[in-house]
Structures are given as structure tokens and as C-alpha cells.
Amino acid sequence: MQKYDLLIKNGAVVLADKVENCTIAVKDGKIAAISTAEIAAEEAREVLDAKGLTVMPGAVDCHTHFGIYAPMDKDVNSESKAALTGGVTTMMSYFRTGAHYMNKTGPYHEIYKEALEQAAGNAYCDYCFHLAPMDNLQVQEMEWLVEQGVVTFKYFMFYKGLNLGANSTVSPTMSDCYDLGHLYNIMEEAARLNTMLKNEPISVSVHCEDDEVIKAFIKKVNDAGLKGLQAYSEARPPIAERVAIMKAGTVANATGAKLNILHITSAEALQATRDLLKIYPNIKLRRECTLHALGLTWEMLQGNNCAKVNPPLRTKADNEALWEALKQGEINWVGSDHAMTPKALKLDDDMWGSCCGFGGTSLVYPFMVSEGLKHGLSLPRIAELVSTNPAKAHAAWPKKGSMEVGADADFALINLDLEKTVHAGADFSAQEYNVFEGIKLKGWPVITILRGKIVYKDGKILGEPTGEYVKRPC
Ligand SMILES: [Zn+2]
């Protein structure tokens, strides 16, 4: 009997601090050895020759939205395929009760179980969920949710005063008290639960945009006659991000909760996080940005309502400020904020009436390798940003995001010389368009491996959906 299930030979392996030619041995879905010494082919049932390829840890896309605008089971199925094409082997998805998603409200004891049932057997990559407690009863469910493997919670700063349920029979919050006090309660409970666990795995992720500032600016852009994505960007200006960041940070510091500031889009928002660290040196703060906040601007896409997203697209100067923060180590990870939004919900002649969000998970490695190398990031730093750090921050490490013996054998094998133009439809997503359409990227995954099995190769998804639920903390 062979000692290993799989050997990956001749690849340039991206380790934590260097890139080295070595052989990876896999046994029972886990990394069994990483060695610069020869491991004989006879020792394994299968040998994969990775000559000319760079072996990165499978990406952990920690910001996605399964089931937001499509039935949960179908969306998990199609969008997890898209993930594999981008070298993503774990998707972490936000979920809440209320409008969109499953259009249901009630206790997570019922609805979370239902969401898990719908996801089960449909995912092509591994997955887990972050949940948003929308009312006080759901805050009381956080302890039970931690037992179910949910250690990350979400709060939306902009839901409070905006009428976001106008086109729905169910309001997004289903609560009259969705305000800063509610965030305080969530954070207080998160901090309390952390004291009962090893390594404080629980954190609260906050979408930082202030609804009251947005309301005032919507009026300003309408009065000025602005249109399209410019109007949207200026209606939700960086100052709305700053105000929300300062509030969320103040509450996090007071409660001792770990705070993840999601999808920072602007130089101003970034500066606000620096200010927070100055005011509250002991704050437990992590910072995220997205592919589109690094690579797209409203000017590039003005008139294309498909690119409407919260927080909105900004300017080239903002993109560059975020790249600089990645280089300086200020931003901890990059996610896609993947939310498959059907074209039918994007109205060509009605920007305000179009739904927000779009897909992006299939570009996690292609975009970050292509643009990251151009911006002076090393391959180990890129792997840290899309795999190791998101896994650590969301308590999925060292099972996920780790190029170490004992970790899950999840890999993206990348051809650094392969140049392709982004086209909708090439990634198995159900979304009919791609906001990165026509952009040339260099460095694409050609093989994706999930727990030792080749699940994507040369443009094809292989086998059935074998993705598993990742119960955290790992
Ligand atoms: Zn999101």
C-alpha cells in the first residue's frame, strides 16, 4: 500500500516567507509532507506534475453572499463552481434573515438550520457562514450559533434610517431597534463569549456607511443633477464611511469586541481606521478591502448599472491608496464581496432602482496575482492576503489557509505566464455579466485542489459537489 494519496511534484511552492521548489505529499485530504528532498513516485497512488506552475494555498474568500438574489441551493451550486476557477477553495458567506436571502424572518435556530440544509450537497468548495443578528432574540442566539460553528457576526451601519425594503414585503431588518445600541449589544455578547473560548475566535464584521450622512448626500447629488455611478458614489461619500468607522470603532473599544471593518473603499476611510488606532491603541481591529475597490472606478464604468455596489466604486486615487495600504501591511485581507446579482435586477435606465452587488470570486487569484505583482506585492504576501489572513481572522486556520503539514490539502496551481481577458460566462457563475469584462489579467489558476482532490482543471469542473461545512473555530 502506498504511503500517500497524491504527490505534487516540480511546482514552485509559495510558503509563508518564500517560494521554493518542493514536493507536497497528501494523505487523507491533508498535507502530509512538504519536502525539498525527493519523494519517490512509487510512494503515492497519484502523481501530479506541476512543472512550470506556482502552488499557492487555496484562497479563502471570506466575503461572499450565497443566496442573496437566487435560491440558496442553486446559488451555492453555481457560485462555488465560479470560486474554484479563481483558486478559491473555501467560501465564507454572509447571511441574515429579512428581505433577499431566504426572505424569512424568525429565530436562527430554525432559519440557519434550513440554510445549512439547502447548502449541503451543493457546494463545490468548502464553506461556512457569518450571521447577522437582526434583533435582540437573535443576539440571544449567538451562544447557540457559536456551538454550531459560527464565530463571526455582522452588523450593517446603513440599515437604520434608510427605507431599503421598499420593493419587498419583508423589511431587511425586521426590527425597530436596529441602531448603534443594537450593535453595542452584539459586540458586548461577542466579547462575553470570547472570554469563554480559547484564542478569542469571535469577531464582529461591520459594513461601515452612515445612513444619516447618505440621506443628506442623496439630496445633494439629486439637486446637482448627477447621474449614474458618479451619483451613486457621491451619494454615499467617503465621509459616510468615516463617520460609521469612528462609531463602530468606539463601540468595539468600549466592549472589547474584535472588529473587522469590511470593504474599505477610500483613502478617507483608510485614514479613519488609522485615526481609530491612534485614539484607541488597544482596539482589536482588522481591515478588509475588495478586488473591485482595488481595480475599478466609477469613471471606468459610468453608465453601467451592473457595477452599482455598496460601498460604491471610487476613484483611481482611492484604488492606489488601498494598494499602498496592502504593501504597508495595514489592510489584513482581500475578499471579493461576491454577490451573484442577475442582470434582470440591474436596470439599464434606472441606476437608483438597480440592485447592489456583483460577483467576483472567480477573479480572486487572477486579479490579485496579476495586479498584486504589478503593484510590488510578493507571492507570499498575496497568499497571506487571500488565504492565510482571512482564515486566521475568521477562525478557520490552521485547517484552512495554511501551507503546513496537517492542514487541509487545498491548493491553487497557477500559471504565472498565462494571460487571459475577463469574459462573463467563463467561470460557471449564474451571473450573465462581469464588471471586470475586457480587463486583461496575467496569472490564472489552471488546477484547483480541494482536500487532495483535483476539482478544477484546464477550464473544467471535475466531479460532483464535495464541499464541506467548515465548523469553526478550527
Ligand atoms: Zn458584502
Image: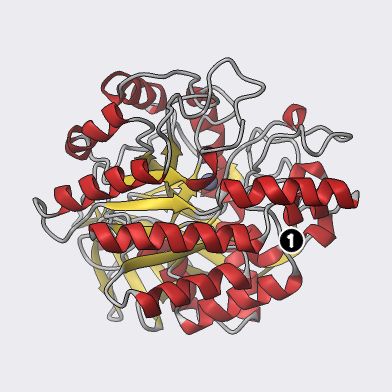
- Say whether mark 1 is within 8 Å of ligand 1: no
* In this rendering, position of residue 61 left or right of residue 232: left
Q: Position of residue 452 (x, y in %)?
A: 34, 51
Colour option used: secondary structure
59 shown above or below 187: below
Residue drawn where x is 60% and y is 71% of the image: 268
Disc 1, SS: strand
Residue drawn where x is 50% and y is 35% of the image: 66
Judge whether residue 52 can be spotted in this image.
no
369 shown above or below 42: below
* In this rendering, position of residue 174 left or right of residue 220: left
Residue 26, by quadrant, is bottom left
Q: In this orientation, which residue lies closer to the viewer: 330 or 17?
A: 330
Query: The disc labelled 1 sits on which kind of residue?
Result: Lys
184 shown above or below 442: above
Judge whether residue 321 can be spotted in this image.
yes
Residue drawn where x is 67% and y is 71% of the image: 319
Q: Position of residue 428 (x, y in %)?
A: 63, 38
The residue that label 1 is drawn on is 420
Q: Position of residue 111 (x, y in %)?
A: 35, 21
Q: Position of residue 339 (x, y in %)?
A: 58, 40
Query: How packed is label 1: few (under 14 Cα within 10 Å), some, or many (20 or more)?
Result: some
